[in-house]
Image: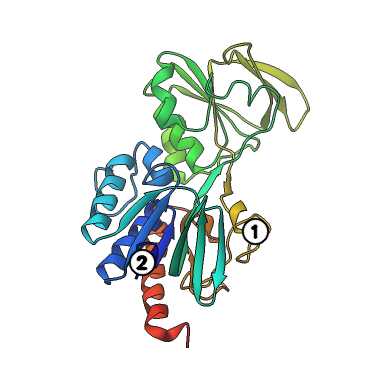
Amino acid sequence: MSDNNYDFVTIGGGPAGLTAAIYAGRGMLKTLVIEKLMVGGQATITHMIDNYPGFPEGVTGPDLMEKFELQAKRFGAEFKFSTVDEIKMDGNMKVLKLGNEEIRAKTVLICTGAEPRRLNVPGETKLTGKGVSYCATCDGAFFRDAVVAVVGGGDSAVKEAIYLTKFASKVYVIHRRDELRAEKITAEQAFANEKIDFVWDSVVEEVKGDHAVKSLQIKNVKDGSASELEVEGAFIYVGMIPNTDFLNGFVELDDGGYIIADHDTHTKVTGVFAAGDVRRKLSRQVATAVGDGATAAMAAEECISGHCFE
């Protein structure tokens, strides 16, 4: 077997990919993890994970993902930092194109995650990195004693708003509805936090500022009234877009661009699996990604044993 031939390749090194690498390596499969940016994915930029079993006091995302990575390496998983441009079939083998390089694999797990959805309003792109952010864990410390806004009402938005209160003097949560979509316990923590105020039934129409964020132009969706909110930072949490552009119809996607896979994470392409945030499913949590990854690796081992290719 040449150096570029593998039994199992996971595209993406988040919780799903790392868990799959642990199981595949432990199953004696020659395993490769291909990661574009940083091992751990979105979990790495999550300050505190409170609902992962085994950590009653919670655990930081970076610490948890470091443990995942070390365990995968312990079982022999290899790591490559690169981007997969395309996947093609060569008989039963999958050919992954990484620029001028090709990786061949008997089985492939796609767990490329999702990217933050943008508001697509004036000023957002210009001021990204100058007050506009999509990661409170990354940038929160730059806003000590500042007034900031979080746009969104889901679980991630509210958790990051709570996190930002460690630094900011005031955090506004701007939500287009009149109630939060976050988990009840998270919402209750936010309501109890004196630093958090809510701007209900509202959307951001413009991010204002010449060289840094100065204010947000806001519209009330019920009565159409406009207002301006002075802030120094805007943290955007209005959903995610799955990273599936590179697949070019290789696997079946739903209308939102998420990969359609069955209960054992198998797609309609033999020997190709999907796990984590990129997969169509009910919940996108570290715990569910771990379950996906473990299932995918065991299903891949079954495939390689002859159950898929006979």
Measured from the top left, where is residue 67 in percent x and y? 25, 49
Measured from the top left, where is residue 4 in percent x and y? 39, 62
Categorize mark 2 by other alpha carbons within 10 Å: few (<14), some (14-19), many (20+): few
Q: Residue at x 70, y 18 (%)?
A: 227
Q: Residue furthest bottom?
A: 310
Nearest to the eye among marks 2 and 1: give it: 2
In the rendered image, the vertical position of residue 122 relative to residue 80, given as above or below: above
Q: Amino acid at mark 2?
A: Ser
Frontmost residue, 58 versus 69:
69
Frontmost residue, 109 versus 67:
109
Measured from the top left, where is residue 136 in percent x and y? 44, 30
Frontmost residue, 176 versus 114:
114
Q: Quadrant of residue 248?
A: bottom right
Categorize mark 1 by other alpha carbons within 10 Å: few (<14), some (14-19), many (20+): few
Task: Quickly name the residue at label 2.
Answer: 2
Upstream in sequence: badge 2 or badge 1: 2
- Taking the image as shown, residue 146 lies to the left or right of residue 20, namely right
Quadrant of image for the N terminus: bottom left
Q: Amino acid at mark 1?
A: Asn
- Circle 1 sits in a helix, a strand or a loop, which is it? loop
Q: Residue furthest left?
A: 74
Task: Quickly name the residue at label 1.
Answer: 248
In the rendered image, the vertical position of residue 247 relative to residue 215, given as above or below: below
Query: Is residue 183 visible from the viewing direction of this image?
Result: yes
Measured from the top left, where is residue 238 in percent x and y? 59, 39
- Taking the image as shown, residue 1 lies to the left or right of residue 202, namely left
Q: Give the distance between the C-alpha atoms of the residues marked 2 and 1, in whole angstroms.
A: 27 Å
